[in-house]
Amino acid sequence: MHDEDDLELDIESKKMLFSSSGLLKTALFAVAYLAPGLNALPSQLSHHILAHPALPAHSLRITEVPADLCDTTKGVRSWSGYLDVNVDQLRKQHADARAYDLADTGITEHFYFWLFESRSNPATDPYVLWLNGGPGCSSFTGLMMELGPCNIADGGADTELNPWSWNNNASMIFFDQPTGTGFSYASWSNTSRTDKPPTRIYSAVAAARDASAFLQLLGMHAKTIATRSSGVEASKARGMTSFHIAGESYAGRWIPTIASQLVRDNAQAIKHPEWGIDPLPLESVMIGNGITSPKHQFPAKVTYACDPKADTEYKGPILNATVCADMVASEPQCAKMLTKCRESEREPIGRGAYSSVACKEALQFCDAKLGDPWGWTGRSYFDWNHQGDYEEEPWFEKWLNTAPVRKALGIDEKGAADDGSGKYNSCSDEITDEFASTGDGARESTWAVKDLLDAGVRVLTYNGRRDFICNYIGNDDWTRALEWSGKKGFNKAPLEPWYEDVFAEDDDTSSSSSTISYLESTTSKLANVLPAPLNMPFRVLSSTLSGFKNDVETEGGAKVPVSRKGRKAGTFRNHGNFTFAIVDSAGHFVPKDQPRAALTLVNRWLHAGNRIQP
């Protein structure tokens, strides 16, 4: 474990970090080889090890997943595996010994991922990385109960195809980081050791380095991955034509820092063409119900819970007057402590050293005084209209821990989970505590958003209106306060309505109920003309569905619905590359609460540009 007083002096320098200049030292060529120490792989699966000399400490261990697991859409393939990181090799790449004060020798880290190709046109459709929050919560939450190709069903006994999956028009990557999250873990080279290896990641900025290496390797080997799968010709192998990062909750901190790291790594690759690295084609980020600016989000909790004028879709204030008075009284002290946290940062802001003590104290006070009172209501922090926890979470934990599923996914036998048992847990208390001990959650990520906009990267931040913990008021506030070149134009832009897409033979425009009616009517009409499993909205072919009144057409690889003005889904503000959107009748988990609206939002953002309502 670590000493927080030591961390206060220079928290980032005591992490095992890598930088572009530290990694990309050698002449480069793509290689595929079996890395030392990785011979003991599950015998039932064929793994491939993909690496690159520029990233000598990192390699991808990957296998194709059986086609009948999760996405049963005909012809759609998926791959899973690990990013393996040799921490000793990282040590050799850094001259500053202080960077390894918190790391033992003989440690290898294993970051798990699952990649699904697009149901539509994987050769040209974009790639999207999805991250959940926590910190320490697995991205399988998004995969199994929100936007993935399958939803957990039957109490965890099975899955069902998700027709509103985001891989309808994009290849989706679900990545668990830092180690200790989901199936990700660390191990000893000395297999006789039974103690758990210590972590080296205590902040989002530190976590961004490994995520960048993962994405660089994946981008360079995207064609190789497809070619190694059975039946795929090299000439038809898929590359990575465009790339986006999406996520929710604490991903409001992950996403800007990872994207900022990628921008810097891309700049180094362009500056040094002799290295042979193709810059990752990063085009945009999508932050859902994110914690990006604590200085705006904490006071917004008071407004959201106590101001009768707040448009929360709840009639009147949610908390009573006594509780609200206490929250209002605590707000100035919270703001003061957050300011002290920010002022402790040294250059470069966001990436330099900072006082973990000041930030930890701010986080503890603000959470206790402005966040915890919500819990007394019995309502979910994620949706005032939802009581208690979500039933799906233990369901997909159960499914992912079954022997057949683990075998199909190539899961290593031991190492994952806080107790090292190897079992899947959706969230790690240990990681949450580690990040809280450094005050990472009190730190701003808006500096990285500004950097992204300045670099020409498009930014979308969206919010379900019923979420308390990362509410729309706070995210609206920081987007309008952000100091960037388009600030004046953004603040002058009005909030405009946006509408769900309507698909062929889809006349009912009520959200959740229309989803059910659409599936029922479509299933009955297509039962005799399409093979099982049914290819849902965006794989519908007009030649097959000649009897339909309105056919779905294609346009530049993206599927275009018959109408862009169905049910009103919410409001949005846009100027230049920056867009803020609100999703009505949705909480923290927007793709779960409003799957049609969420798919409309992401498809328009990926394929139609910055204005989500044409």
Image (cartoon, rainbow, N blue to C red):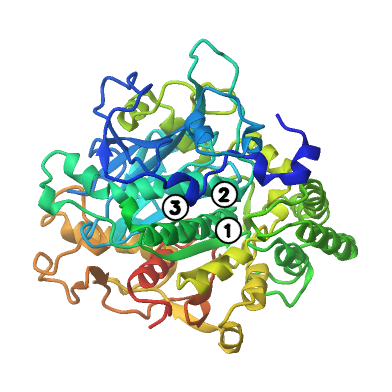
Occupied quadrant, residue 350: bottom right
Instruction: State whether residue 459 appears in this view.
Output: yes
- Judging from the image, what secondary structure is the residue with disc 1 in? helix
Instruction: State whether residue 144 appears in this view.
Output: no
Near-viewer residue (132 or 371): 132
Q: Amino acid at mark 3?
A: Trp
Task: Give the CA separation, mark 3 to mark 1.
Answer: 12 Å
- Judging from the image, what secondary structure is the residue with disc 3 in? strand
Image quadrant holding the C terminus, namely: bottom left
Task: Give the CA separation, mark 3 to mark 2.
Answer: 10 Å
Q: Whole-percent x and y of residue 305?
A: 75, 65
Q: Are marks 3 and 2 in contact (CB under 8 Å)?
A: no
Q: Whole-percent x and y of residue 339?
A: 81, 62
Residue topped by disc 2 = 133
Q: Are marks 3 and 1 in contact (CB under 8 Å)?
A: no
Residue topped by disc 3 = 130
Q: Are marks 2 and 1 in contact (CB under 8 Å)?
A: yes
Residue found at the very far top of the displayed protein: 192
Disc number placed over residue 252 in the picture, else none: 1
Near-viewer residue (202 or 586): 202
Residue under the point 27% across and 62% down: 125
Above or below: residue 210 compared with residue 545: above
Q: Is residue 408 left or right of residue 135?
A: left
Residue density around tag 1, few if under 14, some if 14–19, many if 20 or more, within 10 Å = many
Q: Whole-percent x and y of residue 423?
A: 49, 26
